[in-house]
Amino acid sequence: MPIPEYVRSIREKVGTDLLWLPGVAAVVVNDAGEVLLGRRADTGEWASIAGILEPGEQPAAAIVREIREEAGVEAQVLDLLAVRTDEPVRYPNGDAAQYLTLLFLCRYVSGEAHVADDESLEIAWFRPDALPAMSVRQTERVHRGLAALRGDTHPAWL
């Protein structure tokens, strides 16, 4: 998994200790109502497209960049769905992190979805009634995005 250079420089100072990091994630939906997911290289689990904000980067621009870098498609941000603190994670290399994640609803614009970097093993579109097995957090993200797309009125998930 590529580690942003600024995180790498922090890791040189703090080692594998817990880092609090800003993250972005997306529920990307195409015109057929399918959801774009990636099977993560580090865990093998299916998940929404996500990543770390670079210093000074705007969150909406960051998620569009992450979608392009990970799945090879262009997307447009439609809405901010949630601001959530994720559970702490420990990566296979020992690094610990906890993310404050901004979850966006995005609309597919163009491109053919494919594995575009080394963060994913697979990239695929899924019908809402045929989602792969995912963690509770990932399932909640997708359902929140699909509800917003249907126009269900929910307050922001904070």
Image (cartoon, rainbow, N blue to C red):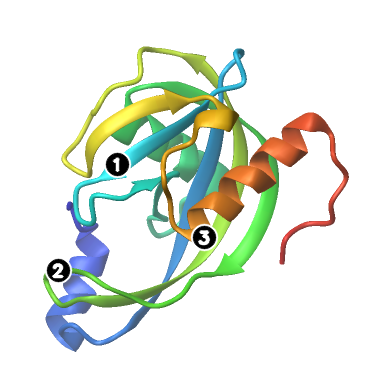
Dividing the picture into quadrants, the one containing residue 67 is: top left
Please name whichever residue, 67 or 40, is drawn nearer the observer in this view of the structure: 40
**Where's residue 135, x and y in %?**
44, 58
Precedes in sequence: disc 2 or disc 1: 1
Could you tell me which secondary element the residue under label 1 belongs to?
strand
Residue at x-position 74% and y-position 32%: 149
Dividing the picture into quadrants, the one containing residue 132 is: top left
- Which of the labelled discs sits on residue 73, or is there none? none
**Where's residue 111, x and y in %?**
39, 12
Q: Amino acid at mark 3?
A: Arg
Could you tell me which secondary element the residue under label 2 belongs to?
loop
Mark 3, residue position:
137
Could you tell me which secondary element the residue under label 3 belongs to?
helix
**Where's residue 121, x and y in %?**
20, 37
- Which of the labelled discs sits on residue 92, or is there none? 2
| Location of residue 97 with respect to 69 vertically, above or below | below
Residue at x-position 64% and y-position 45%: 143
Which image quadrant: the C terminus?
A: bottom right
